[in-house]
Image (cartoon, rainbow, N blue to C red):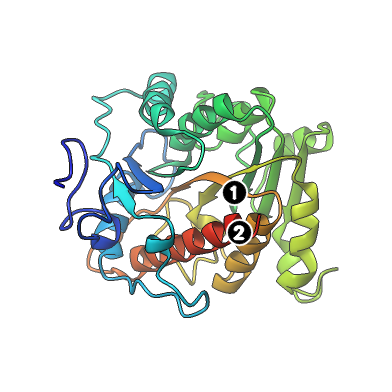
Amino acid sequence: MAVPAGWLGPDENFLGLDEPWCHPDQAGVYVLPAAYEHTSSYVPGSDRGPAAILEASRQVELYDETLGCEPYREWGGVATAAALDLQGKVDRDAVEAIEAFVRPHVEPGRFILTLTGEHTGALGAIRAHARQCPDLCVVQVDAHGDLRQAYQGNPFSHASVMARVVEDGLPLVQVGIRSISPEEIDRINGSKTISTFFAEKILDPSGPYEGRAARWVPEVVKACTGPVYLTFDCDGLDASLVPALGTPEPGGLTWYDTLTLVTALAQGPGIIGMDVSELAPIEGFVAPQFAVARLLYRMLGRIRAGRRAD
């Protein structure tokens, strides 16, 4: 059963899976690379992030010792599409192209993982899922609020992507925020649909949750109003774990914070789709993309386990 045109085979796909485990007719997970970068305001290169994640993923051990299984088998396989060619499209046109790329694959029972560059690329994937799930709740793991109405005059800036999500009428739960403007604070304070968990409050050992995920994660889950779409900006993690970032910030989530959060969301409201953004590879330094690839695989295992518990 050869992998059809438009899909990647064993030497190129996410995790390097052999047939039939990488075949789209069988796989419960689709990985959709949609590299986009146009408004990056600090370190460029996030458009190379998806390819770097795919390459590094082929070194990831497939057995998850915590779950006691190989999660790709539990899903029935993981299929990886050929990368979207945006043909120079930017801003609204790029967002619409990514939405059109993702939308046909959003079906009940299938999980879509979109790999993009700057965070703006996530908007298309979020909109594709929202069309199929009207009660969708967006959970944003991020260092930045991304709630500016426009940044440097562009409403489709990476610093404005969550403002577009809120304007679309989707409830938003933000986790790990630690870099934000007065404009964004005003938007949060003036909204009934935005719940923000600042890093200082949930991660600082002296904060109200004593820096323990077991204490703050239930509050995040409680804030979710429906099935979750997880938009994961890599700078939500502490920069010591993943330093290859477009806009690095210290003080973010740890590896185990993140897995505790994903496990709780999967077992609670459920996670029905996700994207990852803002990895900007550093030449000759593979650890960041390997960490992200391995984290994504661990997330997929926990998302699947959450579905089995339903």
Q: CA distance from mark 2 to mark 1?
A: 9 Å
Total numbered labels placed on residues in the image: 2
| Residue 184 position in % (x across, y down) | 71, 37
Q: Residue furthest bottom?
A: 65
Nearer the observer, 30 or 234:
30
| Residue 89 position in % (x across, y down) | 31, 23
Residue 104 vertical placement versus 116 (above, below): above
Q: Residue at x 64, y 23 (%)?
A: 168
| Residue 217 position in % (x across, y down) | 74, 62
- Element at badge 2? helix
- Near mark 2 (Cα within 10 A), the count class, few <14, some 14-19 or many ≥20, is many
Nearer the observer, 212 or 58:
58
Type of residue at label 2?
A: Gly
> Which residue has dot 2 on it?
306
Tag 1 or tag 2, which sits nearer the N-term? Answer: 1
Q: Does residue 251 appear in the picture of this structure?
A: no
> Which residue has dot 1 on it?
271
- Near mark 1 (Cα within 10 A), the count class, few <14, some 14-19 or many ≥20, is many
Q: Marks 1 and 2: in contact by CB < 8 Å?
A: yes
**In this rendering, which labeled residue sits more in front, label 2 or label 1?**
2
Asked if residue 293 lies left or right of residue 267, the reply is left
Type of residue at label 1?
A: Ile
Q: Which mark is residue 47?
A: none
